[in-house]
Image: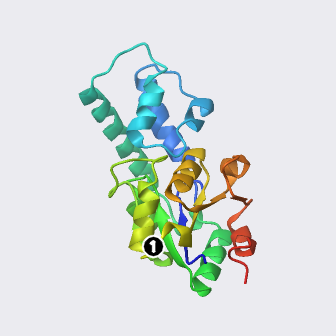
Amino acid sequence: MIKGIIFDLDGVLLFTDKYHYMAWKAIADKFNIPFDEKVNNRLRGVSRMESLNIILSYSDQKFSEAEKEVMASEKNELYREYLKKMTPSDVSDDTRYALDKLRARGLKLAIGSSSKNTPLILEKTDMAKYFHAVSDGNNISRGKPDPEVFLKAADYLNLQPCECIVVEDAESGIDAGTAGGFLTVGIGCAAQYEKTKRPIKNLTELLTIPELSE
């Protein structure tokens, strides 16, 4: 019996892709590294340092770990400045409707995101009130496709993985959910992924999947 739902944040509940893109492009341009939407798509669902390593793989230059740390920090500062401009209107009415209905059914809701900026995003968009627990980049040591972030979210909800659904938009997130023993729901790009158990087009469709139907 499903008692909880764990949502990835970016790409599922709201979209900050444009801010990530702008911040990473600023870093790439600084070092004359080619960066476009195709490269950006490879960054979905992976950690900041993993994303940086992907970007740097397109460069002939070699960077020390210390230099990489500086670049990652600079990117995050740029990104956070963009996030500070977010408002509740950045979350769609459909998303808020789905979350309200799921809570009304007695389901426990949690965030399972690799982002260390999750608290800031939830604050700026007035989303924190929907969730019973938050597991994010501030409390994990391994990024997706490792299931750690989802396993901790389930633990915070006092539920077993088999009692929870994971909702993801990235293949790495679906891999993480599968590895952790969760039922996976894919939205966006992940809806087409072969490992996704329940594909949906928008969050309101969560209300009609067999495991959550009234």
In the picture as drawn, the residue positioned furthest to the left comes out as 66
Choose top left, top right, bottom left or bottom right for residue 120: bottom left
Residue at 45% across, 19% down: 32
* Viewer-proximal residue among 32 and 13: 13
Residue at 45% across, 69% down: 154
Q: Is residue 112 above or below residue 34?
A: below
* Viewer-proximal residue among 118 and 194: 194
Which color scheme is applied?
A: rainbow
Q: Residue 157: give x, y in percent of width and height.
A: 43, 75
Q: Residue 214: give x, y in percent of width and height.
A: 72, 84
Residue at 59% across, 37% down: 41
Q: Residue 17: give x, y in percent of width and height.
A: 56, 47
Q: Tell me which amino acid carries mark 1.
A: Ala
Which quadrant is the N terminus positioned in?
A: bottom right
Q: Secondary structure at mark 1?
A: helix
Q: Residue 75: give x, y in percent of width and height.
A: 38, 39
Choose top left, top right, bottom left or bottom right for residue 77: top left
Q: Which residue is mark 1?
A: 128
User: How many neighbours does mark 1 have within 10 angstroms: few (below 14), some (14-19), or many (20 or more)?
Assistant: some
Q: Is residue 201 above or below residue 143?
A: below
Q: How many marks?
A: 1
Q: Is residue 26 above or below residue 118?
A: above
Q: Is residue 59 above or below residue 3?
A: above
* Viewer-proximal residue among 146 and 12: 146
